[in-house]
Amino acid sequence: MSAGRKDKVAYFYDSDFGTFYYGSNHPMKPHRLCMTHHLVLGYGLHKELEVYRPRRAYPVELAQFHSEDYIDFLTRATPDNQDDFKDQLTQYNMFDDCPVFEGLFDFCRLYAGASIEAAVKLNHGLCDIAINWSGGLHHAKKTEASGFCYVNDLVLAILELLKYHTRVLYIDIDVHHGDGVEEAFYLTDRVMTVSFHKFGDFFFPGTGNVKDTGERAGKHYSVNVPLKNGTDDATFHKLFKPIMAKVMEMFNPGAVVLQCGADSLANDRLGCFNLSVNGHAEAVRFMKAYKVPLLVTGGGGYTKNNVARCWTYETAVLTNKDADLPEELPPNDYYDYFAPDHKLNTRSTRILENENNRNDIERLKRDVLENLRQLAHTPGAQMAELPPDAYIPEYDFDDEDNPDARLSQYARDHLVIRDTEFFEDDRDNYGQ
């Protein structure tokens, strides 16, 4: 990024996200993406963004990380036929946390396609920052779903970035450990994964000990910062800022992927931290200041009105409009969802005791920084012939209902959304 000019920020969104529904008792609500988007519009932040409707990733692209048999299963499984796949449901961990719901594979293709396309734009210098709030599904493994996540868009985006960058840094501020991404790159020194998360008390997924630092060539390139219940803004940033400053000094990445799971906010339905919206966004602000190509994604977040507040404010941070944002929420199609106060920053109604004492924090910081000092120098990697961008297969007439419309559909998928599209009525897609 050039320090002398305004950052170009690409933003990916599709109103179809509001049509996907995990189930009435499931905490994951894709509807939160619609709420975020309309709050972004209400504040006028779209005027600072290049807004794109993402294309749906092809199965062959998803299989760059995931096994072909797993992707094939996702293409075929539906709520109506899932009883025919009982063995596969067990094999691929598709149960209560990861149900088969209507449009599941389209959902995966859409959020993964957005992250892949965001990485391509960053690679070609078409933007400085890319935002995909629908992405960040960091628990998905190579051969199975996990923790509400089916396809690991983060791994796919990082693989895309590695085509142009020798080193890529992944940062995760979700309350849950970013286990799927860490596992994918545990043996390499070209990707450093850094996760700040709750650890202990059998908290999902149970991984992310400070002693887990990678293996073989990846030794010391997995960085885990395990925290306790009640982590607040001050505690978080006593660790985040010095650790990330040292990471940037030692690793010197060509691109950064930042997963902004909002379940680390106070009052989250599944979380146990006390971060404020501003404290959460401070991590985004800190990393943005390094002026390295940056992909920002969503992730967890299960109190959806607070998720929308957080990701809207972070959109403002990424466009340098955070100082201009009024505290009073603007009128928008989801205004009633933000009752009773209709404020950007809400007061926490569930303050958990901060179980991280001063000695814990100092010891944890010392251990992590000592691990980082084991990196003698930034790793090098020879890059020969430049690999191709995200693979787009030859058109298959069986893939679309209307083959005559294929070119116009492809064009529509890649158009910047115009002003006339911004306030389309999405009320039919509200979900639960």
Image (tube, rainbow, N blue to C red):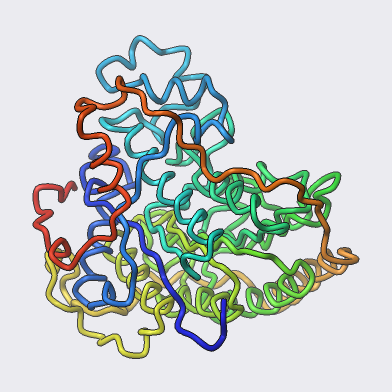
Point 65% across, 61% down: residue? 169
- Number of numbered tags placed on the structure image: 0
Left or right: residue 110 compared with residue 338: right
Image quadrant containing the N terminus:
bottom right
Q: Residue 13: image x %, image y %? A: 30, 56
Please give the name of the residue rendered at 62% of the width and 63% of the height, measured from the top-left corner: 255
User: Viewer-proximal residue, 8 or 306?
Assistant: 8
Q: Is residue 143 above or below residue 376?
A: above
Q: Is residue 85 left or right of residue 402?
A: right
The answer to which of 82 and 27 lies nearer the viewer is 82
The foreground one among 207 and 428 is: 428
Q: In which image quadrant can residue 378 be found?
A: bottom right
The image shows residue 387 at horizontal and vertical percentages of: 64, 44
The image shows residue 121 at horizontal and vertical percentages of 48, 58
The residue shown at (22%, 51%) is 15
Residue furthest to the top: 84
**In the image, residue 102 above or below residue 390:** above
Could you say where residue 392 lies in the image, as x and y percent from the top left?
46, 36
Q: Residue at x 72, y 57 (%)?
A: 166
